[in-house]
Image (cartoon, helix red, strand yellow):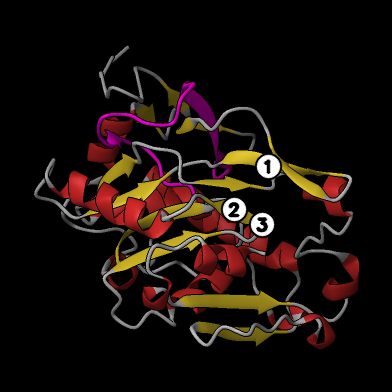
Amino acid sequence: MTIKNLIQKAYNPKNIVIGICQQNDSDKFITTEYDNVKFLNFKPEFSKGVCWARNKSNSMYNGEELFLQCDSHMEFVKDWDRLIANEVCMANKLTNNPVVFAAYPSAYQFKNGIRFFVGNPKIYLTKLMFMDHPSSIILTGYAIKNNFILDRPIKSRYLNGGFMFGNGAFLRDIKIDTDIYFHGEEIMTTLKAYTNGYDLFHPSRHICWHNYNRLKDHGDFVYHWNQDDESKRIVKWRTLDDKSKKRVAEIISGIYKGGNELGSVRTIQDYEKYACVKFRNRIVYGDGLTGIYKDN
């Protein structure tokens, strides 16, 4: 459904190239009649998590002017590609730095097999929350406006992975860390983008919906770490997850001794002030929307 929607709702579908990383049993791989869709197919036991899969998808980038990263189970508004191009154009007038956008989509669900949209479309901001483990930083969305158009893009403090877009060069500049298994994906992408000089934005309008309630709607919500697939893996998901959490925790606390994971244009301390967070103290303070810095 997502493939058809992306192409059928595009203003210029001939300009759209879709790269998909499928992780499934061979008899469940999907195909498509569209010739501008590329697939990389992997059996679940060879998959190493979400960042590994995103890296595989990004490897299909071939110099396109703009990129869109999205999850499956998406529904887009008409002319979504032109809207995204306009958002990037507007943001480029607000800053001399490269730009990248992200947002939480509004929700849709199924009722008696019919898709329906939950409430009115909204523009969602993204905020950070600290969880129990030092690396467990999650992003949640909250609506700032009950309609779906602002006068221009607004600054974001975080990048969530399910809906992100910007200039195509982002996929060359910001390499997804394949050693990050699941937790930490979004904060690491955020830190890489910001420290490499990218300015972060939320779009000024609603562009898409996402089916968040797939278990209830379809009954087939299969996790990467389900037991059937896990039994076939040489390296177990828990090993990957423990290594990943340790790496993220060390990077955000400044004690990581590995390679240079972040950029050199800005520091992680610059980001903390910009986003109103203190990683070592595990606190969020000030106003992450306006960037008003309250040192208390």
- Label 1 – label 2 distance at C-alpha: 8 Å
Q: Which one is earlier in the sequence, the residue at label 1 or at label 2? A: 2
Which label number is shown at residue 108?
1
Ranked by sequence position, the earlier of labels 1 and 3 is: 3
Question: Are there few (<14), some (14-19), or many (20+) residues within 10 Å of tag 3?
Answer: some
Q: Which residue is drawn at 50% across and 57% down?
A: 247
Where does the magenta region start and end?
A: 133-160
The crowd level at tag 1 (other Cα within 10 Å; few <14, some 14-19, many 20+) is many
In the image: residue 23, left or right of residue 205: right
Q: Position of residue 25 (x, y in %)?
A: 81, 82
Query: Residue 226 lies in what quarter of the image?
Result: bottom right
- Residue 255 appears in view: no
Marks 2 and 3: in contact by CB < 8 Å? no
Choose mark 3 or mark 2, whichever is in front: 2
Quadrant in which residue 53 is drawn: bottom right
Tell me the residue that label 3 is attached to.
73
Q: Residue at x 50, y 25 (%)?
A: 143
> Does any portion of residue 105 appear in the rendered image?
yes
Q: How crowded is mark 2: few (under 14 residues within 10 Å), some or many (20 or more)?
A: many
Q: What residue type is labelled 2?
A: Glu
Read off the residue under disc 2: 75
Residues marked 1 and 2 touching at CB (< 8 Å): yes
Image spot of residue 265 (x, y percent):
15, 54
Q: What element carries label 3?
A: loop
